[in-house]
Every structure is written in C-alpha cells, then in structure tokens.
Image: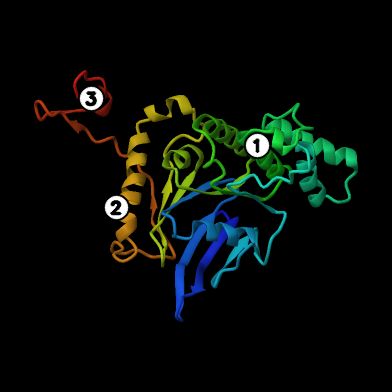
Amino acid sequence: MTTPRFISMEGIARRYPAPGGGRTTIFEDLWLPVQRGEFVCVIGHSGCGKTTVLNILAGLDSPSEGTVIVDGQAISGPSLDRAVIFQGHALLPWRSVLGNVTFAVRSRWPDKPREWVEAQARRFIALVGLAGAERKRPAELSGGMKQRVGIARALSIEPKILLMDEPFSALDALTRGTLQDEVRRICLDTGQTTFMITHDVDEAMYLADRIVLMTNGPGACIAEIVENPLPRERDRTDLHRHPHYYTLRNHLLDFLVTRSRTFRDSPPPGYDRRHPPVVRPGAAPQPVPVPETGDTLPLAQFANRRHP
C-alpha cells in the first residue's frame, strides 16, 4: 500500500507582472511529494524561486496556479502548524531568550498555565544548548546564539513542518557546523518533517534525506529528486570516507555548474514535470588518471601520492 503524502505540491506556479506588460514566470508546474518525517533540501541558483516555494508552504505567499496540501488540507494562509526559521534570527530585542520562546509557546497554547508555558520554553532552550542563558537579551548574544534561540522558538511550538530558509548562511564555519549537528539530531530524535532551502551542497548532503534540484529561472522547474545514499545516521568526521560521498557530491555540483543552465530548455527524453526523475547516485567512484604513466588509481590511493 502506498504511504500517503504528508506534503503534496500539485502543479504550483508563481508569476509576477512584468515591466511594460505581460507576466514573468518564476517557476511553473512544480510537483513534489514529501513524506512525514522526511528532511528535504532544495538547491538551485538564485532566481529559481526557492524562497518563494518556501513562502507558499508557510502560507506567506500564494501560488498563481496549483495548490499545496499538507496533512490532507490545502494551505490557505499562515499557521502555527508550520514554523519558519529565516536567515536572520528575527528576535524581539526587548525580550529575553526565555521571553522570545515563551511568546511563541503562548501563541500556540494560549490556555495553558504559565508554569507549563515556561517549562515548555525551557525544554527547547536546553535542547539547543542555551540552558543558563534564559535571562539574556538578544544584544548580549553572539550571532550563533541568536540563531539557536530562533531554532528553539520554532521547535517549541511542535510544528507539523519546520521550514528553514538558509538559516546558517550568515554564520562562521564552526558555528554553522555545530548548529547543523544540533538540528539534525533534533529532527531525527523527534521525527520532525523539515523543508529547507540552501546553496550549500555539503550542507544538503549532511542534513537531507532527499535533495530537490531546481533549474535556473525564470520558468524554473524541478529537474531531479536525489535520494541521499549516505546512511541516515551520519558522523560528520568520517562522512567523506563513505564510498558514495564523492559520487553524490559530484552529481550535485555537475547539476549546479552545467545541467541547471540547459535542463529547462532541453530536458532529457521522457522527462515529465509531474513525475520528476528520482535519482540515487551510488556507483563506485571513478578512478583518477595518474599523469606520469597514464594508469589509473582509486581516489583514496591517488590522494596519498606525494606528487599528484
């Protein structure tokens, strides 16, 4: 029996008035199913409509055509069932860490007693590693800590869907990696359904169960849905040693560098927008030529040569 889709994007498009008349189509005829508990990342060049798709899922924008169905109901506007983490933390500067998170919890459960609301907020503040900082205001926090508060606030309302719009892009590499680890752990532990857009190939590989590849805009479409062949339980320190790691990475980079520019106008034979091809890169890494002899060596051996 087929598992029912938790999220179903059905033929959605977004068009805007163009200067001098007419309309500009950002993307059109997008079809995408998402199962409950999945972590889905969308990758594509600027201008393909990734953020617009996320805003439609959040109910902050409406499609020009088509519809989005979540848990059996069409989206008609914003809802606390869908929490958004933006690129900026968007915290209330006059409220403390605890105040920012309790504000969200109170909005979700207005009839709960104060003690329950505060306990719920403290639980998620601790979950993102900020226990002890509850009374600090945003001005007293680092950029990474502010983003942790934003994550705690979003998760504290226990949404059906967590929507993330490049939430780590403005952070330094070490902080970004730490927050990626925490978000991944939380989503795995709670079974959180997550939809994220990013420009970072390595981030998508580390976090996602499936990676959606969008062609260049205007008139963008979904080219492929890539199933991540890496194990769901991932360790950042040795992920690059997995035999499918470079196959997957090269596949994604090849799309972004080359195929995303031509796919929209010259799709492969049999391509159907309603059923974008599902790809699972899993072939063994290709051998690399050795310049001195013309022979080939596996990537691991080639990397150990003193004079590549």
Residue positioned 78% across, 43% down in the render? 94
SS at circle 1: helix
Whole-number angstrom distance, CA of label 1 to CA of label 3 = 41 Å
Quarter assignment of residue 185: top right
Instruction: State the image coordinates of residue 53 (x, y, percent, origin top left).
Output: 53, 60
Instruction: State the image coordinates of residue 306 (x, y, percent, origin top left).
Output: 21, 18
Residue where numbered disc 1 is placed:
148
Q: Residue furthest front?
A: 139
Residue positioned 51% across, 72% down in the render? 16
Say which of 290 and 138 sits in front: 138
Question: Residues at badges 2 and 3 in contact (C-beta under 8 Å)?
Answer: no
Indicate the amino acid at tag 1: Arg
How many discs appear? 3
Tell us which disc is closer to us: 2 or 3. Answer: 2
- In the figure, 295 relative to 271: above or below? above
298 displayed left or right of 49: left
Whole-number angstrom distance, CA of label 2 to CA of label 3 = 26 Å
Residue positioned 43% across, 36% down in the render? 230
Residue where numbered disc 2 is placed:
258
Tell us which disc is closer to us: 1 or 3. Answer: 1
Indicate the amino acid at tag 3: Phe
Residue where numbered disc 3 is placed:
302
SS at circle 3: helix
Colouring of the image: rainbow
**Crowdedness of circle 1 by 10 Å Cα count: few (<14), some, many (20+)?**
many
Q: Residue furthest bottom?
A: 21
54 displayed left or right of 300: right
- In the figure, 307 relative to 1: above or below? above
